[in-house]
Image (spheres, rainbow, N blue to C red):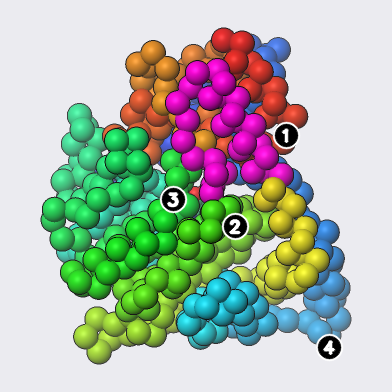
Amino acid sequence: MFQINENYQKLPGSYLFSTIAKKVNAYQAANPDANIIRLGIGDVTQPIAPAIIEAMHKAVDEMGHAETFRGYAPDLGYDFLRKAIADNDYRARGCDISEDEIFVSDGAKSDSANIQELFSANSRIAVCDPVYPVYVDSNVMAGRTGSYDKEKETWSDVIYMPCTAENNFVPEFPKETPDMIYLCLPNNPTGTTLTKSQLQEWVDYANKVGAVIIYDAAYEAYISESDVAHSIYECEGARTCAIELRSFSKNAGFTGVRLGFTVVPKDLKCGEVSLNAMWARRHGTKFNGAPYIVQRAGEAVYSDAGKAQLKEQVAYYMNNAKTIKEGLAAAGYTVFGGVNAPYIWLKTPSGMTSWEFFDFLLEKANVVGTPGSGFGPSGEGYFRLTAFGNYENTVRALERIKAL
Ligand SMILES: Cc1ncc(COP(=O)(O)O)c(C=O)c1O
């Protein structure tokens, strides 16, 4: 008789956003006239920018002619895209990253879930709390997290780094020494970030203790303050301790198109073994390349027209963030984030739990957000709203919340 991977049985409940969707669907079924505004899931709403659509059309046409048809893409990504990334995201910022350290993929979710494969089964992971759930769940599936404590909602072998208003959402170095440290900056869900000098301290720490930082920079495009690093490779010494994950989902609206990349510097080694070579081997074996049409779309993100159009798109969402943040503050809420990220993190009022506030907001204002506790125990008593809605709905949602 076959045996299953028992680690999957350890995963508690369903994925956070499935639970939310079920609750919202049940409410809508019971209240068919309710006009529900969704500021919960971090999905974008603005259409793909014209310069990118044009590039995709051109690539589609190429596929229809024998002379320009493309079959399997190179598994690590087309040179034209890897060069555009290296030039614009790294060299232009003074980061020493070359094309062959960039691995093109179908997005940061899969990369953030898959990257743990490179590390031994007994590696200790450290995560911020609250946290993007994929980091922990993918390590649960790999059997790296020990046993689950239902009361505390924590795993015995995971090192949690609480990020709350008390420490200004800046994780402290853990007492136990981790092997892998997940940092998501700017942060989902708190919408906060670290300054470059605070990040430098993490790089120095990782190099000192021999840990690898898995640096998820999916929200890099939303950074507005000058003392915040756009890439971890702006920090000295990051080439020997950091892997960076990037996504085209939030800066260019590719949540449905699917494109991302991971940077694994050649200086990142365990003894003589190069993690760059390991990730190349993994990609070659398990991934057959992002589609040509999509990689051409990615290239257009870095064209002059693409850059100008995406700057406007990011500004549009950040105007929503400002609207939410200022509106909530005026209504007496304590709010965080929304300056370098498209997320607003608020303290639930009157001591409500995160899920109590979720139900309250859904029933009384027909607005959907995300309960902070869904991202980890330190998220209890907080709530996340996203700036990815359209402006009109964002304003309407705020009017309803203010009227409560
Ligand atoms: C922190 C973080 N990383 C990765 C992702 C997923 O990115 P992608 O769409 O590229 O898979 C998300 C999406 O919400 C995210 O919040």
Horizontal side, residue 39 vs residue 355: left or right: right
Answer yes or no: is residue 283 visible: yes
Give percent across and percent down for residue 81.
65, 77
Instruction: Report how far apart the C-alphas of labels 2 and 3 lie in the structure.
Output: 13 Å
Please tell me the numbered disc located at residue 221.
2
Give percent across and percent down for residue 82.
60, 79
Q: Earlier in the sequence, mark 2 or mark 3?
A: 3
Of the two numbered discs 2 and 4 in the rendering, the one whose residue sits closer to the viewer: 2
Q: Secondary structure at mark 3?
A: loop
Q: Earlier in the sequence, mark 2 or mark 1?
A: 2
Which of 400/53 is in front? 400
The stretch in magenta equals 316-343
Residue 322, placed above or below residue 60: above
Does 319 appear in magenta?
Answer: yes
Instruction: Report how far apart the C-alphas of labels 1 and 4 lie in the structure.
Output: 45 Å
Give percent across and percent down for residue 200.
34, 65
User: Which residue position is annotated with label 3?
Assistant: 193
User: Which residue position is annotated with label 4?
Assistant: 67
Please tell me the numbered disc located at residue 391.
1
Does 1 appear in magenta?
Answer: no
Instruction: Report how far apart the C-alphas of labels 2 and 4 lie in the structure.
Output: 37 Å
Please tell me the numbered disc located at residue 246.
none
- Looking at the picture, which amino acid does disc 3 mark? Thr
Instruction: Report how far apart the C-alphas of labels 2 and 1 lie in the structure.
Output: 19 Å
- Looking at the picture, which amino acid does disc 1 mark? Tyr
Q: Earlier in the sequence, mark 2 or mark 4?
A: 4
Q: Earlier in the sequence, mark 1 or mark 4?
A: 4
Q: Residue at x 42, y 56 (%)?
A: 195
Q: Residue at x 55, y 84 (%)?
A: 99
Q: Earlier in the sequence, mark 4 or mark 3?
A: 4
